[in-house]
Image (spheres, rainbow, N blue to C red):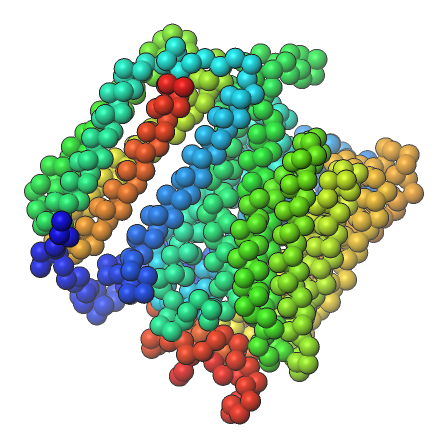
């Protein structure tokens, strides 16, 4: 059989010559709001993510009041939030649960992921690979607006008449969430929007990376940040659909009265449920953690990518062990799909299953250690420039290190069981995500701000922001290790005040709370700096940090289409201090 | 500004953007339906009793539906092949038939659903019906989505044929890949739910 031959009319792809010369000026709405330009969408994502981070943090600052001073009334807060939440200024436990569930949901799905993946991925990745835009600009826009709708749904759930927002924790464990108030349904609908947004974004990132990279930019010449986003996109693409399936099933349980997650003979408040029964509550946990463990790496990998870029740039040295870092990254992405049940040792899964999952968990810690160690060794012998992005990147290393090392006891069945429901877990993963990931993201904002705006952020304000945040983060989270090791449960609205055994450590709750509020104050210089520098920052040219990667060859800010010429990569990403070169950096591109 | 490799293939990967995009999308769809099938297995193995599908569901109607969907996959290929042979008129006929097959599938599904509801067999009755309605409902939504895309290429989207036939042919091929996937899901659903 011969291959079907194409007639001449079909064979030759017609170049859109007519389109190229015809450049119409877009109106305000198409240019800044419903834009298909990856840079505008990236900034939209980043600003949305930052606003949600602030909002989610505010929920926590409110919770911290009740944890430090349980039952003490704040009359003016009662007047603002109303009698259904804080009657007379005293926080109801139901409202505390709303705040807790929504703090987790918002910080993870609406704060860090939109900023790390949507924001930095969209803005930086196409520039770093020398692409004119994302592979599917319209899908990119759709992805942002799905996130926006999901965010609006989550916010609206606070004010709906049917009993406020979701109260069953960010994990929405069943059967509790199946029988919870109306806010849970809104949570599920919101999550379906957010999952759709992530899926559309992920397939766009993968396609863009494979197809639109510049000539000469082979995979092993990718900046580490591109690799990090590439692996992250695969995690989002493959791990999110099972949570979508679980969300659909929970929605069916709540709306159509099915019993996917409701076992037979369930009694709630002395009343037997009339559902058919026969469901399996553990099924939800499996599907949830099948997403949520890879999600942990979705949170951390982009930050690692950013930190790697900044460390190479500011030590003026190539990254130490670039290849092993890349291989570790890919291996880590693969392994993250088979460790999920280490979040479920408390379910009594049996020693065989526990042995499997604690083994994979110990294995997955190896690539993380390889990456972190490579980054630390990269500092060796460098003449380090201590600018604001570098300070945040440097702080990321020990903070993420503390978070990672304190996770080891949680990965082993025998030590996880006494620690699992305590504040120790909160301390552990917040060290990974707050002074870890968020410091990485802050570093990225200071680092690529000049590319986005053409101006540098103020260094003094940046250093105040950095120093204050570093100290406060540790005041917030270090005491939680102590409280957790004393055995205080992480699910109490009063922070343990009702238990005798917790009395000796309760004063640490006050430390954490004051740390959190002070941390809030230290974000003010950042917020001011972020807006003030748009108009008043020091003006810069296209490569203010004297960096080597391709995004620095585009004008700052890059025009529509990004590059003035056609970018091409001639060498690896981190050719700093090459012996015999005229300058201490030798870009991937040639001007 | 035009995005490279929208129409022409990139030489080192041998693919267009759309081809990679649709396969990645299908990979995520595999994970979505895979999770639901896994849930089905877990709930069924944990249940003390489980009805055989043919005692609760209409196997003859579902068999007809299987034939209808497989036929629609054939006409979908023929629609794309017509474009490859530069026969736009034949494309319209085959694409129209594909859409009609999809419609036929949904109509038969509607009769099945309404018979169940009439007998009082609704999702909350038991977990067999719960997973049946969830899986077939989600599959039905995919059929509807595929039909919407196909109808777009049959109608307004066909304008692209005049200006850029290669691109149009590629887009029909990608729509076809999705359509075959939806068909394939049904090929798994039918024995799992109706026969086992």
Q: Position of residue A396 (x, y in %)?
A: 67, 63
Q: Quadrant of the C terminus of chain A?
A: bottom left
* Residue A508 seen in this snapshot: yes
Most foreground residue, B54 or A195: B54
- Residue furthest to the front in view is A1
Across and down, in percent, residue A503 comes to 90, 39
In front here: A440 or A152? A440
Task: Please report the residue visible at 67 percent of the width from the left and 17 percent of the height from the top.
Answer: A268
- Which residue is at a point 47% across and 58% down the rendered structure image? A230
Left or right: residue A10 versus residue A102 is left
B146 to the left or right of A37:
left
Q: Is residue A115 above or below residue B110?
A: below
Q: Is A481 positioned to the left or the right of B99 in the image?
A: right
In front here: B131 or A21?
B131
Q: What x and y, as percent, mark residue A579?
A: 55, 89
Residue B126 vertical placement versus B146 (above, below): above
Instruction: Give me the residue at 57% from left, 29% from top.
Output: A283
Quadrant of the rendered image containing residue A398: bottom right
Residue farthest toward the top in the current orientation of the protein: B119
């Amino acid at each position: 059989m011969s291959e079907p031959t194409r007639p001449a009319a079909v064979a030759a792809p017609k170049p859109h010559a007519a389109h190229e010369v015809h450049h119409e000026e877009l109106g305000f709405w198409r240019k800044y709001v419903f834009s298909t330009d990856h840079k505008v969408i990236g900034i939209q994502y980043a600003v949305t993510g930052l606003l949600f981070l602030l909002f989610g943090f505010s929920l926590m600052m409110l919770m911290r009041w009740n944890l430090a001073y349980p039952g003490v009334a704040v009359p003016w807060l009662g007047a603002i939030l109303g009698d259904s939440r804080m009657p007379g200024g005293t926080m109801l436990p139901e409202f505390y649960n709303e705040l807790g569930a929504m703090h987790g949901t918002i910080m993870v799905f609406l704060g860090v992921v939109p900023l790390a993946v949507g924001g930095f991925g969209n803005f930086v990745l196409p520039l770093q690979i020398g692409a004119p835009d994302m592979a599917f600009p319209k899908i990119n826009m759709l992805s942002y607006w799905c996130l926006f709708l999901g965010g609006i749904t989550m916010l609206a759930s606070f004010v709906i008449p049917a009993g406020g927002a979701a109260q069953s924790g960010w994990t929405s464990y069943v059967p509790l969430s199946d029988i919870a108030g109306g806010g849970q349904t809104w949570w599920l609908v919101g999550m379906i929007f957010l999952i759709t947004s992530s899926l559309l974004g992920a397939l766009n990132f993968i396609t863009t990376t494979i197809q639109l990279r510049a000539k000469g930019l082979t995979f092993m010449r990718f900046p580490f940040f591109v690799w990090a986003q590439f692996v992250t996109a695969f995690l989002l693409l493959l791990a999110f659909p099972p949570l979508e399936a679980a969300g659909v099933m929970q929605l069916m349980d709540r709306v159509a009265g099915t019993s996917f997650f409701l076992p037979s003979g369930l009694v709630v408040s002395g009343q037997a449920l009339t559902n058919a029964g026969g469901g399996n509550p553990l099924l939800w946990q499996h599907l949830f953690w099948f997403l949520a463990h890879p999600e942990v790496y979705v949170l951390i990998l982009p930050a690692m990518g950013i930190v790697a870029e900044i460390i190479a740039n500011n030590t003026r040295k190539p990254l130490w062990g670039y290849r092993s870092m890349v291989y570790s990254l890919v291996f880590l992405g693969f392994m993250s799909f088979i460790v999920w049940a280490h979040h479920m040792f408390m379910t009594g899964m049996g020693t065989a299953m526990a042995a499997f999952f604690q083994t994979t968990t110990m294995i997955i810690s190896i690539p993380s250690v390889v990456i972190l160690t490579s980054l630390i060794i990269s500092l060796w012998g460098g003449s380090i420039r201590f600018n604001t992005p570098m300070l945040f990147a440097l702080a990321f290393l020990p903070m993420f290190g503390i978070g990672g090392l304190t996770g080891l006891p949680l990965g082993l069945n025998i030590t996880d069981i006494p620690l699992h429901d305590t504040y120790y877990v909160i301390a552990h993963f917040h060290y990974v995500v707050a002074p870890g990931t968020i410091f990485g993201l802050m570093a990225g904002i200071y680092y690529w701000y000049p590319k986005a705006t053409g101006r540098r952020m103020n260094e003094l304000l940046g250093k105040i922001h950095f120093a204050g945040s570093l100290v406060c983060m540790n005041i917030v989270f270090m005491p939680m290790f102590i409280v957790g090791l004393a055995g205080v449960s992480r699910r109490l609205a009063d922070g343990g005040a009702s238990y005798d055994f917790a009395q000796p450590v309760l004063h640490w709750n006050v430390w954490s709370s004051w740390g959190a509020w002070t941390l809030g104050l230290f974000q003010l210089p950042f917020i001011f700096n972020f807006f003030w520098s748009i108009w008043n920052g020091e003006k810069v040219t296209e490569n203010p940090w004297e960096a080597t990667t391709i995004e620095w060859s585009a004008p700052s800010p890059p025009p529509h289409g990004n590059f003035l010429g056609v970018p091409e990569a001639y060498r690896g990403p981190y050719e700093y201090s090459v012996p015999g070169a005229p300058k201490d950096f030798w870009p991937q591109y040639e001007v | 500004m035009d995005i490279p490799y929208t129409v022409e293939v990139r030489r080192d990967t041998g693919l267009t953007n759309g081809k990679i995009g649709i396969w990645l999308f299908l990979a995520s769809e595999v994970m979505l339906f895979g999770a639901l099938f896994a849930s089905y297995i877990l709930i069924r193995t944990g249940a003390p009793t489980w009805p055989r599908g043919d005692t609760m569901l209409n196997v003859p109607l579902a068999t007809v539906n299987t034939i209808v969907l497989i036929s629609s996959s054939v006409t979908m290929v023929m629609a794309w092949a017509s474009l490859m042979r530069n026969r736009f008129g034949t494309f319209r006929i085959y694409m129209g038939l594909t859409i009609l097959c999809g419609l036929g599938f949904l109509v038969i599904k509607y009769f099945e659903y309404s018979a169940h509801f009439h007998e009082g067999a609704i999702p909350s009755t038991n977990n067999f019906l719960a997973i049946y309605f969830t899986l077939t409902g989600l599959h039905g939504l995919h059929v509807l989505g595929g039909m919407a895309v196909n109808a777009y290429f049959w109608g307004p989207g066909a304008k692209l044929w005049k200006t850029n036939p290669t691109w149009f042919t590629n887009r029909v091929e990608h729509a076809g890949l999705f359509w075959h996937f939806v068909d394939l899901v049904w090929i798994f659903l039918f024995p799992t739910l109706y026969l086992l």
